[in-house]
Amino acid sequence: MGHGGPEESDAERKMRFLFGLRSRGVTDARVLTAMERVDRGLFVRGHFADRAYDDMPLPIACGQTISQPSVVGLMTQALNVQPRDTVLEIGTGSGYQAAILAHLARRIYTVDRHRRLVREAQGVFQSLGLINITAFTADGSHGLPDQAPFDRIIVTAAAEDPPGPLLAQLKVGGIMVLPVGQSDTVQSLIKVTRGISGYDYEELRPVRFVPLIEGLGAE
């Protein structure tokens, strides 16, 4: 699917965007509605702005990326967010994923190691009136112990294994979705469900994400 020409209307662009999501397996009605409400164009700056509605990852500041919409949709769908849930997101990035989650859950806590990304994302959240998102600059590999436990955890950077602190911060019955694997090879999107006696792991699909790095980003 190429991107439409300048004559493409907003309505047509939105139709094409949603059709693309559906054709790649994003079928959950609530997820599609949330993705329809959040304009990805607000999260993509500079000379990639005209590609904001294409199904491709795009570069953002601090050497990070905004994930392609179909992967955001599939991760959100796998998370199975409920209206009363509190969600922890590791890797705010552009803020696009958190904004979608804000339409689906009660509270979103999102952390990123890059202060600039958090600051820019907070600006977009405020402009959209998304008052149920709290964004922090922090080392996401430790989670947010002060706010734990969480109903849902989503990680938008790849670790070799699901980080222990994040598993520990998941409620029983809770779900975590994250990419797992060596950063320079194929990774798998994993859905972890916490049961009473342990964790259940389900492999969803191959993906590619930036690596989960400990510590804070350089200013």
Image (tube, helix red, strand yellow):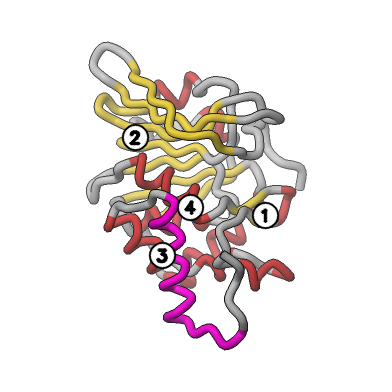
Q: Mark 2–mark 4 contact, CB under 8 Å? A: no
Residue type highlighted by circle 1: Arg
Q: Quadrant of residue 147?
A: top left
Residue at image point 56% right, 58% down: 55
Membership of 38 in magenta stretch: no
Q: Dividing the image into 4 quarters, which one contains the N terminus?
A: bottom right
- The mark nearer the N terminus, 2 or 3, is 3
Residue for badge 3: 18
Residue type highlighted by circle 4: Ser
| CA distance for labels 4 and 3 | 10 Å
Residue type highlighted by circle 3: Leu
The crowd level at tag 1 (other Cα within 10 Å; few <14, some 14-19, many 20+) is: some
Element assignment for label 3 = helix
| Residue 150, disc | 2
Residue at image point 61% right, 39% down: 209
- The mark nearer the N terminus, 2 or 1, is 1
On the image, the x and y values in percent for residue 135 come to 50, 50
On the image, the x and y values in percent for residue 110 come to 48, 46
Residue for badge 4: 70
Element assignment for label 4 = helix
The span shown in magenta is 6-24
| CA distance for labels 1 and 3 | 30 Å
Q: Quadrant of residue 61?
A: bottom right
Mark in front: 1 vs 4: 4
Residue for badge 1: 116
| CA distance for labels 2 and 4 | 25 Å
Residue type highlighted by circle 2: Phe
- The mark nearer the N terminus, 1 or 4, is 4
Can residue 134 be seen from the camera position used here? Answer: no
| Residue 35, disc | none
